[in-house]
Image (cartoon, grey):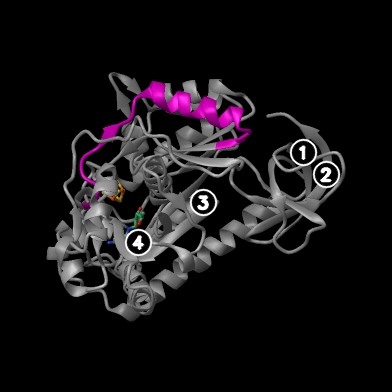
Amino acid sequence: MKNRIYIETYGCQMNLADTELVQGILNNNGYTISKDADNADVILLNTCSVRDNAEQKIYHRLDHLKKFKKERSGAVIGILGCMAERLRRNLIEEKKIVDLVVGPDEYRRLPELLDVAFGGEKGIGVKLSRTETYDDITPYREDGLSAWISAMRGCDKFCTFCVVPFTRGRERSRSLLSIIEEIEKLSSRGFREVTLLGQNVNSYNDNGKDFADLLASAAEVDRSIRIRFTTSHPQDLSDKLLHTIAGHSNICNYIHLPVQSGSNRILSLMNRTYTVEHYLELIDKARKIIPGVSFSTDIISGFPTETIEDHLLTLDVMQKVRYDGAYMFKYSPREGTKAYQMNDDVPEETKSKRLNEIIEIQQRISNEINQSLIGTEEIILIEGESKKSELFYAGRTDTNKVVVFRKNENVKEGDYALIKINRATSATLFGDFISRTNL
Ligand code: 5AD
Ligand code: SF4
């Protein structure tokens, strides 16, 4: 029987969560999950369309898989996720080896569409839904410490550069109850960290229960489980939410709050619906309400019409906020978005040069922040051996920084430990073990 399935995941954390969902659906329908492509009957790529280079990576991978398909003529090759939604039937016409194209809201139909593909036809499911949340489906997860939970799907923000509202459709929330039940199950399996996901997680709404309500309930399931969440939009980050984070020791003091640009003119062209002044006030307020809170951000360089002055304003906002971390990108025009109609007029070299300056500033700031932590004591969740040496453990602070310390018999993977930081680079903190601890 042809039932071994292998999935490769590209792009954001939402896709990682969706891959587990797809594995859950297929596992319930008699498929087994394979860890490598070599002996799989079905190879699925869960794809990302957010920038052109993400799509190019998938095209290369498909070219690679062509040989594989020739060798194993029966194997089904399929595209899931954002590229499936964006490119639809074109993918099948252009890339003859693709047998299956299934967008983010049609995963329930995968067993049926796979049967179509095994029968020699093309399996296509690309309708978006206003209601699908897969609320009743248990994702297939290996045992571990850290789990993703998708709390909502889609996005209604329509930032002018972004393809997500077109590939993932309208916002819709899962029920609070089913999310809590999922956390309860994870707790009994020994998980120690849950990240609640949504493209714009702060607009979560289950019949009047908002994201702060969800976070509070999630935190109360098991006090030894850390709760993280991403992504927040500056427009929807409420005072109630900030107080909820401050009020629970197991909700991480870490907010991913993409600014995208430091120029109000560009922010307006991006339809980001806030000004830099409003954004900075929000950061100040959050720092007052949640002492020690840290921030990360997303930044785009070279949006249409961006001048050197706009760019300098972006560097300026980075220096004002002093982010702990940043995801930094060159603007990439996406067909179908509003910005696609604007002239992509910032030359490639200028985009790269500005991006490099942005990266440099961020590295300097991350390093300075990390150096300032030398001498402090941090609670970390021990995630496992350090990548570089089996004599050391690595874990994370609640502000998401990696901390490395020498192993000892008082603690093991999955424990919380108090560490005194004694050395730092821009990426990693090093320290001495003080004691095992609770959150
Ligand atoms: N070009 C470059 N970066 C983009 N992002 C989204 N769309 C684009 C695009 N067209 C970035 C944004 C967003 C992050 C997930 O990806 O910064 O916050
Ligand atoms: Fe894209 Fe903006 Fe929605 Fe984020 S908030 S997914 S950048 S449209």
Q: Which amino acid does the dot numbered 1 rest on? A: Leu
**Does residue 191 belong to the magenta stretch?**
yes
- Disc with the residue nearer the chain's start (3 vs 4): 4
Q: Earlier in the sequence, mark 1 or mark 2?
A: 1
| Residue in the image at 53% along x and 25% along y | 184
Residue 235 badge: none
Q: Given the current orientation, which residue lies at the most extreme right position? A: 409
Nearer-N-terminus badge (1/3): 3
Q: What amino acid is at disc 4?
A: Ile
Contact flag, marks 1 and 2 (Cβ < 8 Å): yes
Numbered range of the magenta stretch: 167-193
Left or right of 197, for residue 378? right
Give the residue type at disc 3: Tyr
Q: Mark 1 points at which residue?
A: 418
- Do residues under tags 1 and 3 come within 8 Å of each other at their CB atoms? no
Instruction: Provide residue 310's location: percent of width, then percent of height.
Output: 31, 63
**Whole-number angstrom distance, CA of label 1 to CA of label 4:** 37 Å
Q: How far apart are marks 3 and 2 (CA)?
A: 27 Å
Badge 4 residue CB within 8 Å of ligand 1: yes
Residue 356, horizontal then vertical, whole percent: 45, 72
- Between discs 4 and 2, the one toward the N terminus: 4
The residue under the point 85% across, 39% down is: 410
Looking at this view, is 303 or 197 the one in front? 197
Q: Disc count in the image?
A: 4
* Badge 2 element: strand
Nearest the camera: 142 or 382? 142
| Nearer-the-camera pick, 388 or 47 | 47
Q: Is mark 1 on a helix, strand or loop?
A: strand
Which of the marked residues, 3 or 2, is nearer the chain's N terminus? 3
Q: In percent of the image, x 59 and y 57: which residue is there?
A: 366
